Every structure is written in structure tokens, then in C-alpha cells.
Image (cartoon, rainbow, N blue to C red):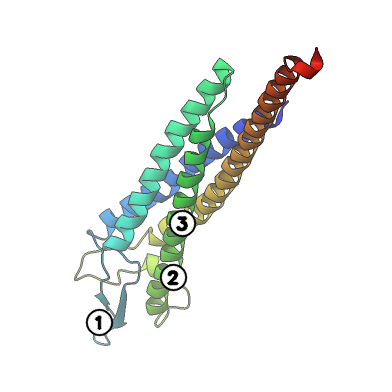
Amino acid sequence: MGLNNVLVLSQVTTYILTLLLALCIIIPISFHLIDFKGHCLLFSNGTWRETDGQLVVTWASQGFCNYNLSWSGISLLIALVQAYALIAQICRETESSLLSAFFDVVISLLMSMAALAGALMITIGYQTWCDAIMLRFEACEDATTNNIDKEDGIDTKMFYMQFGTAQFGAWTSWVCWVALSMFSMLKVMKYHQQENIRVSMARERARLVGDRHSPLSE
């Protein structure tokens, strides 16, 4: 199996994995927004009221959750399109061009940065929420068994599992996009090397033809 086939198969596998990981972010965060009545717990804080033991939440912007839904949705679409294109390429036994490989590098690098920002946002934002929870409970997951915010009517039963899944999906997606960046760069280097060889062979052919028709060769 040639280098190109190995790279293409590696890309297909990683794109499919990236697609599945995007769902690990989109599904739990979407359900979280439903459970929390549109509020996003990322970077949300609060104080505990002594009279009834309720958490008075200072809700952060919903944009933190929306950002992660957005980049993971784009990640899903790109992974779906690219996996389909590469599988079709394998079936037709053709190769992509240097230009398309270069665009793959740019897209993969941009998605790597977007995934890293999203993963950091989920990790740090979730820790901010848990810091407020653990002012009263020993562990963050203990709040899943208590109605801690009756005023906002939020359902906290699943937030621990939801953001645990989303955090796993975000960080693993980042790893996948970094790997896809490396695969794309290897393809660009391969195509560039092939182009240099073709140019060198063309020059050598032109030189030999020129030497054959020169007066000195007669």
C-alpha cells in the first residue's frame, strides 16, 4: 500500500471519528440548554442563600454554549463532506490535487484552533460553575440529586454527564483536527515533491532534446 493510500485511509478514519465526536458535543449541550431553560452554565456563578439553601445564580452569556454548538456543527459538516469525498476518491482510484490538499491544511488548522478554544471554554467554564456548587457540596455531581435553583426552574439531573461528555468530545475533536492537519501537510509535501520531480524530468528531457539537435552532436 502506497503512502498516498495510507494517508487517505487515515484521513477517512479520522474524519468519521471527528463526525461522531461532534455529536458528543452537540447532543449533550442541546439537551443542557433545554434542561436549564436556555441558560448556559459555562462561566456561571452564584451564591448560596441561607434561608432556603437555594443557589442564586448569576448566569453567564448563552454565547459560550452557542459557540460550542456552532464550531462542532461546522466540524460535523466538514467531516461528513470530506469523508464522502475521500471515499469516492478511493473508489475512483484518483488522487486529489495540490491545491485541494493545501485547502485541507488551512481548514484543518482553523478547525484545530476553533476546537481548542471550545475545549478550553468548556473546561474552564464548567470548573467555574463547579466552584460555586462546591461551596456547599463536596463534589460537583452532588448537585444532580438536589433542586438547587427553583426560581429559574432548571433541571440539574443530567448536567454532570452532559458536560463530561461534551468535554471529552471537545478535547478529542481537537486531537483529531491536529492529526488531520498533519495528514494534510504530509499530502502537500508529497504532491510538492512529485511536482518538483516532474519539473526536473521535463528540464532534463528538454536538455537532452536540445543536445541531440545541437550542431556539436552531428
Query: What percent of the width, then of the height, locates residue 142?
Result: 43, 70
The answer to which of 86 and 201 lies nearer the viewer is 201
The residue to which callout 3 is attached is 113
Residue type beneath disc 1: Asp
Q: Residue furthest left?
A: 151
The residue lying at 39 percent from left, 81 percent from top is 136
Residue type beneath disc 2: Ile
Report whether 98 appears left or right of 147.
right
The answer to which of 155 and 128 lies nearer the viewer is 128
Q: Residue furthest bottom?
A: 50
Residue type beneath disc 3: Met
Q: Secondary structure at mark 3?
A: helix
The residue lying at 37 percent from left, 78 percent from top is 132
Query: What percent of the width, then of the height, locates residue 171?
Result: 51, 56
Tell me which numbered mark, 3 or 1, is placed earlier along the sequence. Answer: 1
Tell me which numbered mark, 2 or 1, is placed earlier along the sequence. Answer: 1
The residue lying at 27 percent from left, 87 percent from top is 50
The residue lying at 67 percent from left, 27 percent from top is 203
Query: What percent of the width, then of the height, locates residue 98?
Result: 54, 33
- The answer to whether residue 123 is visible is yes
- The answer to whether residue 155 is visible is no
Circle 3 or circle 2, nearest the eye: 3
Tell me which numbered mark, 3 or 2, is placed earlier along the sequence. Answer: 3
The residue to which callout 2 is attached is 124
Report whether 115 appears left or right of 204.
left
- For the N terminus, the quadrant is top right
Q: Gap in Å between the C-alphas at discs 3 and 1?
A: 44 Å
Mark on residue 173? none
Mark on residue 52? 1
